[in-house]
Amino acid sequence: DIQMTQSPSTLSASVGDRVTIACRASQSISSWLAWYQQKPGQAPKLLIYKASSLESGVPSRFSGSGSGTEFTLTITSLQPDDFAAYYCQQYDSYPLTFGGGTKVEIK
Amino acid sequence: EVQLVESGGGLVQPGGSLRLSCAASGFTFSDHYMDWVRQAPGKGLEWVGRGRNKTKSYTAEYAASVKGRFTISRDDSKNSLYLQMNSLKTEDTAVYFCARGSIAAHPVEDYWGQGTLVTVSS
């Protein structure tokens, strides 16, 4: 199985900050990586697919980069609505696997 | 508007069975692969399995933790996805989400339901 490792597990930031979350795959997954946002009590929401493609309706302050085993989610100018948990997921091969998550908290 | 509504969760004893349903609307259900993903209380997301469409003979893939105990099925005439869960364990306690797979060579989970809570406890 492909292991997905996210860092950091928790991140404290202020409104307006630039935030970067890292995700590492245990083997190459090409660009088959997605990023999801989840708020408490809600379902996950797709933000980024194929490593860097922005899902329709997602604000442009979200961006993804990387390929192979190293990936990054960046939020430029963090907004109040962005305080949430973020998960990466590989969908290159079965079983699909998620990273452990990153909680973005208010500093 | 794409909508996915899960139902069927509840309290069940260890060793018991439960069947979850996911009612889909707002898209051509039969075209899409459909997934189940779960989240234990206070924990991260865990992929449970995927049910493919008729084009792929309704085959399925499962996580190792549920293989042989859980079965994904679907009824395209009812726009519904199911998860039959047998031999339930306490570690199966979680919110179970259904999610739609995008139309692509590598489908990504692009829409999710709100989830249904399954509690396995004596």
Image: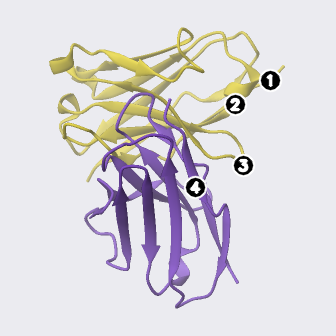
Chain colours: A purple, B yellow
Q: Secondary structure at mark 2?
A: loop
Between marks 3 and 4 in the image, the one whose residue lies nearer the viewer: 4
- Distance between the alpha carbons at the discs numbered 1 and 3: 17 Å
Mark 2–mark 4 distance (CA, rounded to whole Å): 24 Å
- Describe residue B36's horizontal placement relative to residue B18 as left or right: left
List the residue tagged with mark 4.
A6
Q: Image height check: is B55 above or below A27?
A: above
Q: CA distance from mark 3 to mark 4?
A: 17 Å
* Mark nearer the viewer, 1 or 4: 4
Tag 2: amino acid: Thr
Q: Is residue B80 above or below residue A34?
A: above
Circle 3 is placed at which residue position?
Answer: B42
The amino acid type found where label 3 is placed reads: Gly
> Is the C-beta separation of discs 2 and 3 under 8 Å?
no
Badge 2 is on which residue? B93
Mark positioned earlier in the residue sequence (2 or 3): 3
User: Which chain is disc 1 placed on?
Assistant: B
Q: Chain of mark 2?
A: B
Image coordinates for residue B75, horizontal then vertical, percent: 29, 19
Residue at 23%, 33% in the rendered image = B32
SS of the residue under disc 4: strand
**Left or right: B42 as drawn, with respect to B76:** right
In depth, the one of B38 and B64 nearer the eye is B64
Callout 3 and callout 4 share a chain: no
